[in-house]
Amino acid sequence: MQDAKLTAKAHDDHGTVIALNDQITVGGDELLIVGGPCSVESLDQMEAIATQLGQHTIQALRGGVYKPRTSPYAFQGMGEAGLAILDRVRRRYHLPVITEVMAIHQIEAIAAHADVLQVGSRNMQNFDLLKALGEINQPVVLKRGLAATIQELVMAAEYIAAHGNPNIILCERGIRSFDNYTRNVLDLGAVVALKQLTHLPVIVDPSHAAGKRELVPSLARAAIAAGADGLMIECHPVPEESVSDARQALSLEDMAALVESLRPIATAVGRTLPEAIAPREPALV
Ligand code: PEP
Ligand code: MN
């Protein structure tokens, strides 16, 4: 691959393990399952997900507070109030949180309150943003652009690495096609290719690929079978009431069932899922 000096795989066993916090990693044998709503809506919403899914079903929480919406009139995210919610849930449940950064000026506040910064599809080639994310050390989830080639995704990751941050997690989330029955086309060939081309962890977001909740579990299982290092899936305590991406959100029960259904597939491809453990008492913060 052209010029991928830092992200290219040097040999077959070359794989980078990235720590999300002091307990959770991605890129090793254990799969990373990230769950949460499209948008952070309230403390109650995030607490419900953390108490029902945290500690056993998911290893990290997602939730957008700065939302790149197609319409300027649609909900744009809770902003700083949402960051405070993420920070509280992350401390209380010791779950790493992932949230989207849309602009350079948001980096400092997000880095202070979240564990992982997500670059959304619409910003995959915002090169100034990528350079600025190279200046921090926290992990970055880099989502594939709406119509970006595999080469363009790798070179976007290379920007972050070249500017000093090696902690990059690639995310396949579907690409545009002529067919809008599914919101996007999940490119599992890209997952296989990215694992061969780069040493970076690759996770899959079947929610934005499918756009329809009933398609998500099968795509998630296929992604693990194809060699993905983890999944990022949208779920919500009351999916139909999600303020954004309601049609693709899973209920918390369906999310838990999906993760259980991954176990035989994980075993078949030599990966593990964390064992279900009894929920802990949340920390008093
Ligand atoms: C999201 O993760 O909520 C999101 C906006 O995803 P994408 O950038 O892949 O469209
Ligand atoms: Mn979404």
Image (cartoon, rainbow, N blue to C red):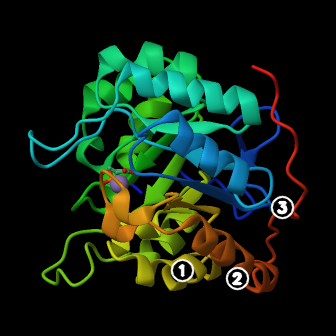
Residue 150 visible, this orientation: no
Q: Residues within 10 Å of mark 2 (few under 14, many from 20)?
A: some
- Image coordinates for residue 19, horizontal then vertical, percent: 72, 38
Left or right of 156: which side holds 136? right
> Which residue is label 3 attached to?
274
> Which residue is label 1 attached to?
217
Cβ atoms at labels 1 and 3 below 8 Å apart: no
- Image coordinates for residue 92, horizontal then vertical, percent: 73, 29
> Which residue is label 2 attached to?
261
Quadrant where the N terminus sits is: bottom left
Which amino acid does the dot numbered 2 rest on? Answer: Ser
Q: Is mark 1 within 8 Å of ligand 2?
A: no
Q: Is the residue 250 above or below the residue 70 in the image?
A: below
Nearer-the-camera pick, 78 or 238: 238
Nearer-the-camera pick, 209 or 18: 209
- Image coordinates for residue 23, horizontal then vertical, percent: 82, 39
Nearer-the-camera pick, 75 or 10: 75
The numbered mark, 1 or 3, whose residue comes first in the sequence reads: 1
Q: Quadrant of residue 31?
A: bottom right
* Kind of element beneath mark 2: helix
Q: Residues within 10 Å of mark 3 (few under 14, many from 20)?
A: some
Q: Quadrant of residue 207?
A: bottom left
Quadrant where the C terminus sits is: top right
